[in-house]
Amino acid sequence: MNYSREDYEAAAAVIRQRIPALPLIGLVLGSGLGALADLVEQPTVIPYEDLPGWPLSTVHGHSGRLVIGTLEGHTILVQQGRAHFYEGYTMQQVTFPVRVMHALGIKTLLLTNAAGGLEPTYHAGELMVLKDHINLPGLAGLHPLIGPNDEQVGPRFPGMAQTYDRHLRETARSVAQAHNIPLREGVYLAVAG
């Protein structure tokens, strides 16, 4: 399935109609982190079923809804659960929510997930901030850039040199240090699932 800018705008329009203020921050919650959405104040909750084109999550523990409101004084859109490539969705469907967030004007996107690791000194439950990634399925042509390109959505091949914002990574390290939270840094190796 190939989406157009109109598809992203249609879902964004539904969201705009239901919220009092536009969020500038997006947060995608991975496995085990769904409860963070409960901390959003004055929440507007939108089930994915209400959003045209939005892929539904079938994974246990992924609630399948947007929670939009205030968190730590910032208007935020929280994606509580997401769709995965291994559920049978295309890469275009998996990335549809991120493109809708862009259509809403979201400038900062925080992605989370639970993943295994290869570094023997890292332990289950530790936090890691990414400095880069290797997309193995993408190397085989399974990525969201396949299909027609709409320059109004973005360039055919976006630059990846600053994919993980240096300032946000430094902020994460500072906050973790201030609260005595161990924080690792590494490279994410993406596989199909």
Image: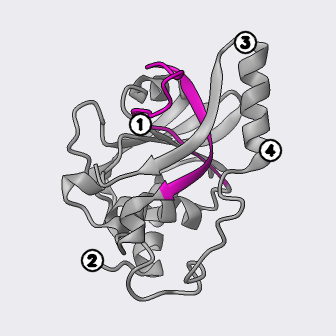
Earlier sequence position, callout 1 versus callout 2 = 2
The secondary element bearing badge 4 is classed as helix
In reply to whether residue 184 is colored magenta, the answer given is no
Q: Is residue 10 above or below residue 6?
A: above
In reply to whether residue 133 is colored magenta, the answer given is yes
Type of amino acid at the residue the image marks with label 2: Met
Return the residue found at the far front: 120
Type of amino acid at the residue the image marks with label 1: Gly
Return the residue found at the far top: 180
Q: Nearer the viewer, residue 93 or 161?
A: 161
Q: Please tell me which residue is depicted at 41% across the width and 89% down the height of the picture.
A: 148
The residue that disc 4 covers is: 167
Image quadrant where residue 88 sits: bottom left
The residue that disc 2 covers is: 1
Q: Please tell me which residue is depicted at 77% across the width and 47% down the height of the picture.
A: 166
Earlier sequence position, callout 2 versus callout 3 = 2
Type of amino acid at the residue the image marks with label 4: His
| Spot occupied by residue 130 in the image (x, y as percentages of width and height) | 61, 42
Earlier sequence position, callout 3 versus callout 4 = 4
* Marks 3 & 4, CB-CB < 8 Å contact: no
User: From the viewer's perspective, is 44 left or right of 92?
Assistant: right
The residue that disc 3 covers is: 179
The residue that disc 1 covers is: 30
